[in-house]
Image (tube, helix red, strand yellow):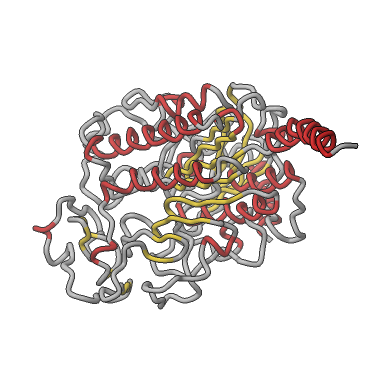
Amino acid sequence: MTSLKKILLLTGFVLQLLPLAAQKKNDKPNVIVIYIDDLGYGDLSCYGAQAVTTPQVDAIAKNGLRFTNGHCTSATCTPSRYALMTGVYPWREKGHNILTGDAPLIIPTDKITLPKVFKQAGYTTGLVGKWHLGLGSEVAKNWNETIKPGPNEVGFDYSYIFPATADRVPTIFMENGKAVGLEADDTIQVNYRQKIGNDPTGKEHPELLKLKASVGHNQTIVNGIGRIGYMSGGQQARWVDEELAPTFLEKAKTFIDKNQQRPFFLYLAWHGIHVPRMPATMFKGKSALGFRGDAILEMDWAVGELMQQLKNLKLDKNTVIVFSSDNGPVLDDGYADEAEQKNGNHRPAGPFRGWKTSIYEGGTRVPFIISWPGKIKPGTSDAMVNQIDLLASFAAYFQIPVPDGEARDSENLLATFTGKNKSGRSVMIEEGYGESRAIVKNGWKYIPAYGKVNEQLYDLNSDLSEKTNVISRYPDKAAELQKLFLEIKK
């Protein structure tokens, strides 16, 4: 056989393999989890909002599966994020409390996590946005060096974050564990127990504030806004609130662009609509709901920009979008931004009772949308699902084994998430702030007594708003759920 014939034969063989290779690549969809902060069930027009319109998120819902009974595990941020990452109820371990900005990492580095599932499946993994799960191994840490362990040590190949929340110091971006834009001679110090440095505080100098505090939020002033905690140094590294959305959006788009030729998992932990609500100038005054409504419009715009990029790169048909929120809504959350005064008839929690921190449904029942073109039939599902189940469900899809004893509260709801099964969880534990817990089974919700609050029982099948405590009418049902609650808790 001549050399030319060998070359032609080999070329033909390679060309025959190309469609198979492409098919194999397409079998692995890209996955983006868009996780909004403090967005309520009723804050989206696809969930009934009328005072604000969210066409970009609505488009995802129109093309995907919109869950009416979708939950986070907890009515506050750190616990919900802990459950999402670990597949473990946060009250079982050390994910229970809302962390300060200098807290050590609470995600275990030696156990399975949601990003590790994707890494084992051959994905490149990225995190952009709010972290709030701790950094390093100690409270006292050197912010001027690379801080480990952090997101990169629990499964993310790339991370661009701020450490906690926008209202907590340090108000800096961190890329792969290192502060962005930090000058060597302007070292950062952070303290949540006593004042450090000479920066003015909101308590001492309220005249310097462009956004007044309503409760707390009167410590170190950054960008004209009082924060929780004290910070000194890092003047050039401090971000401006109005640049958060454009920055996180650009970093997310860059991650997608760099990894468009291979399967990727992106956790876009959006900073809004958490306080301080200070959207980019182009969105200020654009809603009828004040800065809170403006922040919702900004979030919706960013979602649209991200979806447009996927379309431009021809990735939109092979990308799973999971859209949800870390807890229920809140109006006045420490800043006098007129969220209550301008709320009007808007119902951020929809038909549900309760808000952020609450054990009632408004605390944990949140927007929950999953889109996968060609794989998930568009529609609405009433199945009870929880963000904690994403880990086990994606592990099942990729056939990644979950080690015994790990992610033990995560259930495989792959068939439910893809619309092939109308049944979701039968039992779920909900967590409010502090020691409040509840158990839900087949539409019955039991709240054990805590503090000065008596035990309660609600029939969510006929009383979504939890208006009537029926424990005196159904004591046997309450006893059944109490027993089950204690069994799960143990």
Q: Quadrant of residue 156?
A: bottom right
Q: Position of residue 474 (x, y in %)?
A: 63, 38
Residue at the right extreme, as displayed: 1
Image point (55%, 23%), residue name: 63
Quadrant in which the C terminus is drawn: bottom right
Query: In front: 47, or 312?
Result: 312
Query: In front: 338, or 246?
Result: 246
Task: Give the side of residue 222 with respect to residue 435, left or right.
Answer: left
Q: Position of residue 282 (x, y in %)?
A: 23, 35
In this rendering, the answer to whether 358 lies above or below 154 is above
User: How many badges with numbers are in the image?
Assistant: 0
Q: Quadrant of residue 245?
A: top left
Task: Give the side of residue 23 with respect to residue 285, left or right.
Answer: right
Task: Give the side of residue 304 with respect to residue 243, left or right.
Answer: right
Q: Position of residue 218 (x, y in %)?
A: 22, 62
Is residue 360 something that shows in the picture?
no
Q: Quadrant of residue 289?
A: top left
Query: In front: 308, or 147?
Result: 308
Q: Position of residue 234 (x, y in %)?
A: 27, 68
Image point (52%, 22%), residue name: 62
Is residue 428 something that shows in the picture?
yes
Residue at the front extreme, as displayed: 2
Task: Give the side of residue 471 with respect to residue 165, left or right.
Answer: right
Image point (45%, 50%), residue name: 128
Quadrant in which the N terminus is drawn: top right
In this rendering, the answer to whether 150 lies above or below 113 is below
Residue at the left extreme, as displayed: 207
